[in-house]
Amino acid sequence: MIEDYTHMQTAHCENGVVTGLLKHQGLDFITEPLAFGIGSGLLYIHLPFMKVSGGPAISFRTMPGAIFNRTCKSLKIDLVRKKFKDELKAQQFLDEKIAEGIPIGCQVGVFHLSYFPKEYRFHFNAHNIIVYGKKNETYNISDPVMESVTTLTEGELNKVRFAQGVLAPKGHLYYPKSGFSVDNELIRRGIVKGIKRTINDMLYIPGRVIGVSGIKYTANKVKKLRDKLGERQAGLYLGQIVRMQEEIGTGGGGFRFLYAAFLEEASAYLQDDRLISISEQITKAGDLWRSSAVQMAGIYKGRLTEQKDFNDVTNLMYEIAEVEKYAFKKLAKLKLKY
Amino acid sequence: MEKKNIPQDSSALKSMTREVYYVKNSDGKYETGLSSGWSVKNEALDNAWEDIKEQVEEAKKAVLDGHKSSIYYYFTLQLMDYKVLSGYTGFWKVSIKKHMTSKGFKKLSDKKIEKYAKAFNINIDELKKFRG
C-alpha cells in the first residue's frame, strides 16, 4: 500500500483524480477549481436528435478525459495511459505499478460498482477512481466523490474496469510521469490559456447547440414540451436536465460555482482584481441555474401544470444565457496576460 | 450560493457519502461544503426510476404474453442498451433483437443462452423458465 497517499474529496471524479495524483507527486498548489479551469471544464452542449432516458442529451461540462489531458499538457506534465484487451494483463500491470508505489487512476463503469447505491448504478462508464494499494487480493480505493476511502476485491475491480457499453473503459488506467517541475509562470500561463479556451467554447463555436447559444436552444425546446410530450413525459425531460445540472460531481449549479471558484483563485495568481467581478457574474449564473431547477421541479412534482410555468423556465434559461454571455464577453475584453 | 444555504435533505447517496458543493463563506470567498442531498434532484431521480419500473412491468407482461423472450425482460430490468449487451455477450445487435422475440429465443442453444445468463449475472434457468 502507498502509505502516504492522502485521500481528497472533490465535487467531480475527474478533477479529483487529476488533483489527487498530481498532489501526490508533489504539486502542492493544485486544487480542484484550478484543475477544472486550466482544463477548460466548463461548457454547455445540447446534442440534438439524441435522447438519454427520455430526456435531452445535454452536458454542463466538457467531454470525459479532456480536463486531465489539457491540465497536464498546460503544466508540461507527461501522462502515461494504457488500455488493455486482456483482463489478466490489465490486472498485472496495475499490480506492478502499485507495488512500485505509484497511485493509479482507473476509468470504471458504475453499474457494477459495489459501493454505489443502487439508485445511482446506470451503465455510465466514465467514472474515475484512484487505486493506491493492495492487500490480500483487495484493492485500496480512493474515490474522489466520497468522504472517505473504500475497497474493492480483485473480481469487483476487474468487472468495473471492463464494463461494456458506450465509453467502455477497456481497463484504461493512467498516471503522471514523475520528474516534472511547475513554476508560477507556467501556472499563470495555464490559467490564461484555460480561460481563453472556455471563452471560445462558450461564445464562438459555430452552430446553435454549444455554449451560450446551446442554452437558448434548450430553452426553446422547454417552451414546447407541454404540447409536444404531455405533462408526464415533459416532467421526465426536465428531470433529466436537473440531474445533469445538479447531480453529484457538479459542485452545484451546473459546474458554475466551481468555475466561479476557479476565477477567484485565478485573480490571486494573476494579481488581477477584475476577475473577481466576473467570478460574481458566474456565481449569479449558478444561482439562476438553481432557481430554474426549483421551477422545473415544481413541474415534475405536479405542482405547476400551466403553459405559463414552462414559459417561466424558458425565460429563466434565456436570462442565464444573457448573464453568461455578458460574463464571458467581459472576460474576453480583459485581454489577460501572464 | 452561500454556505448556509446548502440543502441538507435526505438522498439515496446517504449510505455512501455526502457530496461537495462550492459555496461562498461569510467573507464572500469560495470554499467547499457538504450536502446530504437536495429534494429537487431527489424527485428527478425518483421519477426516472418510476419510469424505469413501469418499463420493466411492461416488459414482464410482454414476456408472459409470449410476445418477447426473457432476454428482453432482463435487458430492460438491467437498464441495458444494445451496445452494453453486445459488449458482454459478443452478439451483434441484429442477433440480439432476434433473440429477444420468443420465436428467436426457442432456436437458441444452451451455450448461447449461457452467454446471456452470464451477461445478466443470473442462472440459465431464470432465462429458460421465466416466471416474472
Image (cartoon, coloured by chain):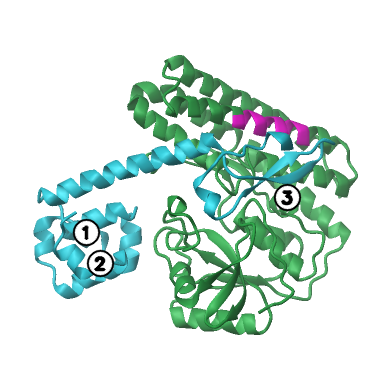
Chain colours: A green, B cyan
Are the residues under marks 3 and 1 on the same chain?
no
Tell me, for residue B71, which label it has, or none: 1
Q: Kindly indicate the quadrant of the structure image that contains residue B95.
A: bottom left
Amino acid on which disc 2 is placed: Tyr
The residue that mark 3 highlights is A33
Are the residues under marks 2 and 1 on the same chain?
yes
Residue A319 shows up from this direction: yes
The residue that mark 2 highlights is B116
Circle 2 — which element? Answer: helix
Amino acid on which disc 3 is placed: Pro
Front position in the image: A177 or A15: A15
Callout 3: few (<14), some (14-19), or many (20+) C-alpha neighbours within 10 Å? many
Percent position (x, y) of residue B109?
13, 72
Amino acid on which disc 1 is placed: Ile
Tag 1 or tag 2, which sits nearer the N-term? 1
What residue appears at the point 85 percent right and 36 percent down from the top-left corner?
A: B27
Front position in the image: A200 or A162: A162
Percent position (x, y) of residue A144?
63, 59
Callout 1: few (<14), some (14-19), or many (20+) C-alpha neighbours within 10 Å? many
Instruction: Write down the chain letter for disc 2.
Output: B
Q: CA distance from mark 2 to mark 1?
A: 7 Å
Instruction: Write down the chain letter for disc 3.
Output: A
Instruction: Write down the chain letter for disc 1.
Output: B
Q: Nearer the viewer, mark 3 or mark 1?
A: 1
Percent position (x, y) of residue A174?
61, 70
Range covered by the magenta-colored residues? A279-290
